[in-house]
């Protein structure tokens, strides 16, 4: 009772000590503590902190409130006062009876929003001096607007009041905003503690250098270059998260990776290595992702464990022909220290773990990775690629974190041995596409229209998973929305669309009636085409003024926007250019191959000569051979880079697309039709021949086994070329000779785009096949793309492909109508009980269905019950796999009941499903009755002796069952021994 009386009786004194200074600080700190302790709820706090209310009024209201809340609250209030007020003032109050202690609340609360409350007093102090950084983090993550920031930063607030206003503003923004703040603070502390631990006091010059470097990194990374030719788009406005996954399965990692996980410890496979590889196809967003990381670091919002970040582009490093020391490389290529170079470099050498290097586009480096030439001395000059290879290996600058990006083709086994982990960048998710389009169009009606038109053209939607194509599609929204029936289907269509878009928007020529736009700009196409084509043979992606001149590229051609000025290589006198994106260079090279009269007759066949491309390192020579001899002499005879191979393949894909009959109206005006017909025939022959080579590599099957083909590199590319041509005759011809029972395309980077092409081509197969697409990125959109070839698939293996219930709905709706379709494997996707009704329908209606495998998804008892409904009416199913779901006893009972009288079931797996004795007893009934069941898998459940006894009993009536697997259940060693003796078919 004492505390409550005290609050009442000493009201005047308390008010005085809280408010007489005129500062709200004491009162606000008391409020912080009471909120953290849960004595005040948020509404109480808001009722007190009404803006504009006088300090005394607030304090009085607080006193009223704590009094009415009772003795406990009063005690805590007094304890809070004691903590907040200076000693001298406490003396004036008699606190004798106040024994309440303010406990530190548990550090980790269930939600971030909750943590913001319980940790409020310490968060306020941790935010001091970091308000700007925290606000920036909130703006970048999209939680705060600039108006929010302005309110927090009002000059009338003291720093700690600003911190509190920040927390107050974060709360209504929800959990993810709260998370951003907590992460930001944690990061800052980690950096701080890393520095403290080492008692680091970087030299003054170092700090100046750090500032200079970060402002230069920030300036370089705040705009996106693809927009350079048209308008400036800031990265903040357009950046959309891509899908990041670990290349190696990691049991601890669930869900997608975040940007910071790239450099974090998650998924590390080699603790000793310092290099992280981010791999992704051309246009998947690797450069943009690094750009984002650079910007966040430069703003102090992410990666703050690194004091310096040195960004490199391998494309630009190709132009460095001098031998450099590490110091020269860092300072000359990234940022020059105005003073004290030696000290700064020494600091870098002494603290490697505080430094981050990024290398964009390792695949574009003229030299392929090799770890043969060792270099350990940071002061010894060497060619830049040798420096880079030694960084990656860690023989040079050990401890410095390195992030390298590359296309997957460039990542050979030797490079892999030096990686601490590999992260795959898989383009946009379906919601990413949505988000990107909305960011791209500030006008919401336009965004909605674009998205609607994408939904009606799933082939195009599939393409939009690639960010570069998503950008083109968004950029060309007017053309897209205007073209109705003829909306783009292939990658070539999309690139032609942007060609038309740029010409019509940048040009003063307005004769754009019909296809006149192409005719009008034919010269530009040929100039840029030649530049692109010749660049390819030299692995040249950056062009000097002289290069442009040689190919006749004029100022007017440059103005069209396909070329952008190369950032750090251009000085005022000597400008350098590159194509908006490497795929754009491939597209122009293809236009040149198709339209020019100056290329060698064998150009096309050499371009499609895949054998050399993937079997040897002779890519250069294969393409070189199709170039005029003068160029051949200029070529350096080094190894081919993976980018070259990949670029040639992309170019060949465009050549196929451009020679499609659908586009003949474009080129017929520019070239004699006989020439074009010849080129079409040539491409057709190349594709057919390419396929034959693959088919010939198929080994004869062992007797009794199916004839199976595992796709060799290049197979998917050929399929994509055939799709680009859109000529069923060619597809039919190419497929007519494929005679296999099983087509295996596991780990082949198959996404929605590849699925469209696969379905287009495979539907021409003569006999049904098993299509194995395990471990790709098919997703729901890809599943939809596969539907046209479902009738030719007798089994479909889609393990580990990010498929959800929605994808299954569409797949099953089609599968039910396909006579051949009999087996499906969907292990490790994102399926829940919402999809089991579709399988139930399938089982009920399709009485030739043989195998259903749904392991490692999220199916519970309810899902099992739904499946059971279908199973009751099914007379064909032989294999049912539900490994690693959560069906429990109830689910097992439902299934057992439905399968009790099955005359077909051969194999049933309920491994790891929380099945106990009730489930085991029910399953015993299947054993009693079945004349077909051979294997029952019950490993990793919670069955005890009682359950096993029932299984043994059932086995007494059954001679057909071969084994029941019971490892890792609730049985003692003695029980296991005894029961094995009694029944040898039990496997423990
Ligand atoms: P890569 O380096 O893998 O070839 P880029 O990063 O150059 O791919 O991406 C090509 C284009 O795609 C970019 O210029 C940009 O227009 C768009 N893009 C890529 N990633 C993103 C992203 N995360 N957010 C927004 N746009 C992106």
Image (cartoon, helix red, strand yellow):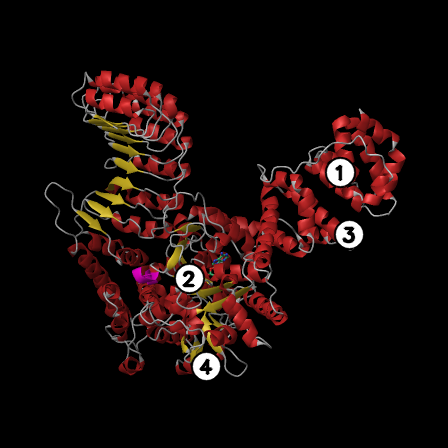
Going from N to C along the chain, the mark reached first, 1 or 4, is 1
Q: Residue at x 33, y 61 (%)?
A: 409
Q: Main secondary structure of the magenta part?
A: helix
| Closer to the camera in the image, 415 or 748 | 415
Cβ at disc 2 under 8 Å from ligand 1: yes
Nearer to us: label 1 or label 3: 1
Q: Quadrant of the C terminus?
A: top left
- According to the picture, the residue beneath numbered tag 3 turns out to be 157
- According to the picture, the residue beneath numbered tag 1 turns out to be 80
Q: CA distance from mark 3 to mark 2?
A: 45 Å
Going from N to C along the chain, the mark reached first, 1 or 3, is 1
Residue 405 is tagged as 2
| Closer to the camera in the image, 361 or 884 | 884
Q: CA distance from mark 3 to mark 4?
A: 56 Å
Say above or below: 750 vs 533.
Answer: above
Q: Which residues are magenta?
A: 409-415
* Label 4 Cα neighbours within 10 Å, binned few <14 / some 14-19 / many ≥20: few
Residue 545 is tagged as 4
Q: CA distance from mark 1 to mark 3?
A: 23 Å
Nearer to us: label 2 or label 1: 1
């Amino acid at each position: 009772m004492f505390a409550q009386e005290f609050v009442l009786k000493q009201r005047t004194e308390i008010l005085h000590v809280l408010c007489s200074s005129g500062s709200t600080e004491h009162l606000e700190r008391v409020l912080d503590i009471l909120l953290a302790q849960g004595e005040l709820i948020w509404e109480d706090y808001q009722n007190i902190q009404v803006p504009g209310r006088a300090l005394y009024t607030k304090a009085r209201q607080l006193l009223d409130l704590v009094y009415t809340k009772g003795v406990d609250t009063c005690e805590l209030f007094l304890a809070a006062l004691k903590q907040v007020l200076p000693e001298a003032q406490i003396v004036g109050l008699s606190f004798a009876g106040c024994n309440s202690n303010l406990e530190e609340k548990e550090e980790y609360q269930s939600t971030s929003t909750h943590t913001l409350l319980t940790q409020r007093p310490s968060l306020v102090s941790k935010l001091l001096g970091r308000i700007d950084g925290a606000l920036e983090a909130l703006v970048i993550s999209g939680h705060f607007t600039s108006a929010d920031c302005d309110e927090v930063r009002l000059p009338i607030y003291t720093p700690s009041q600003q911190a509190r206003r920040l927390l107050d503003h974060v709360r209504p923004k929800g959990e993810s905003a709260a998370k951003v703040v907590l992460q930001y603070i944690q990061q800052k502390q980690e950096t701080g503690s890393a520095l403290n631990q080492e008692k680091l006091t970087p030299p003054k010059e170092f700090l100046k250098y750090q500032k200079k470097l970060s402002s230069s990194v920030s300036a370089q990374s705040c705009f996106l270059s693809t927009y350079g030719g048209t308008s400036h788009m800031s990265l903040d406005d357009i950046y959309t998260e891509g899908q990041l996954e670990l290349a190696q399965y990691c049991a601890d990692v669930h869900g997608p990776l975040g940007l910071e996980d790239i450099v974090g410890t998650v998924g590390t496979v080699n603790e000793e290595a310092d290099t992280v590889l981010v791999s992704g196809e051309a246009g998947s967003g690797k450069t943009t992702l690094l750009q984002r990381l650079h910007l966040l670091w430069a703003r102090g919002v992410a990666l703050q464990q690194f004091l310096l970040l040195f960004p490199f582009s391998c494309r630009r490093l190709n132009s460095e022909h001098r031998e450099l020391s590490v110091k020269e490389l860092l300072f000359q290529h990234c940022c020059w220290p105005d003073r004290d170079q030696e000290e700064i470099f020494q600091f870098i050498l002494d603290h490697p773990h505080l430094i981050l290097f990024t290398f964009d586009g390792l695949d574009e480096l003229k030299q392929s990775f090799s770890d043969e030439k060792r270099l350990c001395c940071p002061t010894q000059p060497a060619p830049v690629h040798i420096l880079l290879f030694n960084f990656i290996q860690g023989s040079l600058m050990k401890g410095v974190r390195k992030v390298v990006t590359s296309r997957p083709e460039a990542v050979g086994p030797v490079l892999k041995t030096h990686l601490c982990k590999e992260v795959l960048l898989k383009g946009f998710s379906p919601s990413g596409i949505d988000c990107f389009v909305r960011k791209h169009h500030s006008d919401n009606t336009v965004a909605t229209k674009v998205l609607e038109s994408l939904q009606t053209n799933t082939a195009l939607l599939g393409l939009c998973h690639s960010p570069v194509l998503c950008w083109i599609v968004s950029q060309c929204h007017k053309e897209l929305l205007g073209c109705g029936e003829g909306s783009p289907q292939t990658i070539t269509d999309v690139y032609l669309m942007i060609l038309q878009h740029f010409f019509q928007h940048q040009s003063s020529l307005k004769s754009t009636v019909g296809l006149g736009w192409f005719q009008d700009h034919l010269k530009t196409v040929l100039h840029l085409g030649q530049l692109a084509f010749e660049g390819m043979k030299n692995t040249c992606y950056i062009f000097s003024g002289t290069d442009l001149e040689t190919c006749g590229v004029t100022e007017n051609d440059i103005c069209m926007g396909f070329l952008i000025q190369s950032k750090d290589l251009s000085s005022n006198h000597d400008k350098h250019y590159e194509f908006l994106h490497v795929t754009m260079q491939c597209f122009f090279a293809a236009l040149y191959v198709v339209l020019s009269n100056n290329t060698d007759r064998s150009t096309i066949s050499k371009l499609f000569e895949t054998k050399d491309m993937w079997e040897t390192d002779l890519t250069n020579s294969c393409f070189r051979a199709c170039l005029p001899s003068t160029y051949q002499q200029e070529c350096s005879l080094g190894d081919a880079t993976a980018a070259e191979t990949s670029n040639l393949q992309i170019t060949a894909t465009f050549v196929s697309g451009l020679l499609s009959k659908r586009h003949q109206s474009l080129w017929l005006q520019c070239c004699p039709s006989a020439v074009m017909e010849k080129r079409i025939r040539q491409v057709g022959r190349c594709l057919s021949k390419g396929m034959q080579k693959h088919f010939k590599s198929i080994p004869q099957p062992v007797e009794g086994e199916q004839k199976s083909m595992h796709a060799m590199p290049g197979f998917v590319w050929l399929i994509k070329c055939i799709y680009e041509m859109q000529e069923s005759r060619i597809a039919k011809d190419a497929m007519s000779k494929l005679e296999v029972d099983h087509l295996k395309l596991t780990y082949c980077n198959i996404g929605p785009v590849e699925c469209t092409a696969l379905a287009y081509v495979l539907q021409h197969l003569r006999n049904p096949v098993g299509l194995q697409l395990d471990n790709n990125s098919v997703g729901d959109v890809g599943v939809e793309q596969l539907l046209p070839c479902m009738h030719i698939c007798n089994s479909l293996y889609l393990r580990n492909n990010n498929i959800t219930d929605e994808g299954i709905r569409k797949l099953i709706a089609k599968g039910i109508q396909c006579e051949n379709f009999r087996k499906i494997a969907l292990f490790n996707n994102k399926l829940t009980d919402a999809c089991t009704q579709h399988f139930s329908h399938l089982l009920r209606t399709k009485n030739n269905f043989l195998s259903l495998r749904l392991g490692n998804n999220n199916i519970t008892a309810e899902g099992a019950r739904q499946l059971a409904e279908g199973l009751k009416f099914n007379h064909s199913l032989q294999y049912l796999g539900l490994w690693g779901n959560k069906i429990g006893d109830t689910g097992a009972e439902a299934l057992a009941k439905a399968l009790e009288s099955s005359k077909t079931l051969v194999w049933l797996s309920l491994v790891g499903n929380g099945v106990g004795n009730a489930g085991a007893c029910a399953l015993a009934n299947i054993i009693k009755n079945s004349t077909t069941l051979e294997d029952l898998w019950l490993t990793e459940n919670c069955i005890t002796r009682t359950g096993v006894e029932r299984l043994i009993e059932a086995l007494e009536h059954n001679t057909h069952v071969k084994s029941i697997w019971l490892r890792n259940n609730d049985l003692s060693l003695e029980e296991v021994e005894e029961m094995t003796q009694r029944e040898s078919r039990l496997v423990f």
